[in-house]
Image: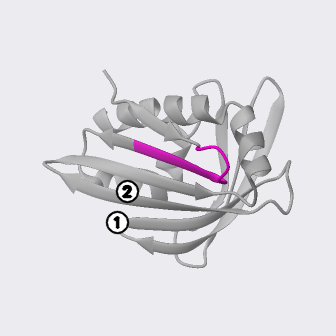
Amino acid sequence: MSNPTAITADDGVPFVDTVREFDAPVSAVFKAHVDPDLLAKWLGPRSTVLNVVEYNATAGGRWRYESGDNGATFGFRGVFHTVEADALIIMTFEFDGAPDQVGISTTTFEEKDGRTKIVVHEVYPSVEARDMALSTGMNYGVIEGYERLDEALAA
């Protein structure tokens, strides 16, 4: 049984907040967020294939991946601003289908009693941009991706 994923998107503000716990130490959960080979095993829904084109998880490093299913491919890219081992990742994100709509994501990692809680705070350039992202089924992809991460961490 996986842990619940709480996703909040309050009206009137361009934020999405996600909170999730994992039954694994912070070092393993953090590594799954910065290692491109591990990331490709869990990010997104089961129905998609993730192709990590570039993923340099260091301050100033670029990232790009393409995700797709049923013949459609969607590209995402950004830049890492802060990467503190087992503690913090701050990065920009941009969907190829919405150019110049750059957001920023802050992920904190906290370990307690061998379990890890992550808190993700995403800031979109507008409420409309945030709502467009949510309308794509983003929540489903986040929830199923974290279920896949549970499985990868248990393996």
Q: Which residue is mark 2?
A: 30
Tally of numbered discs: 2
The residue lying toward the viewer, choosing from 89 and 121, is 121
Magenta segment range?
10-19
Residue at the far bottom: name it.
Answer: 60
How packed mark 1 is, by other alpha carbons closer than 10 Å (few <14, some 14-19, many 20 or more), is: some
| Mark 2 vs 1: CB contact within 8 A | yes
Instruction: Provide the residue designation for mark 1.
Output: 87
Q: Nearer the viewer, residue 112 or 46?
A: 112
Estimate the x, y position of residue 76 in percent, counting from the top left.
73, 52
Q: Quadrant of residue 53?
A: bottom right
The three-letter amino acid code for the residue at tag 1 is Ala
Q: Quadrant of residue 54?
A: bottom right
SS at mark 2 in the image: helix
Horizontal side of 74 relative to 40 (left or right) equals right
Label 2 packing within 10 angstroms: few (<14), some (14-19), many (20+): many
- Where, quadrant-wise, is the C terminus in this rendering? top left
Q: Residue at x 43, y 30 (%)?
A: 147
- How far, Cα to Cα, is label 2 from label 1? 8 Å
Front one among 16 and 113:
16
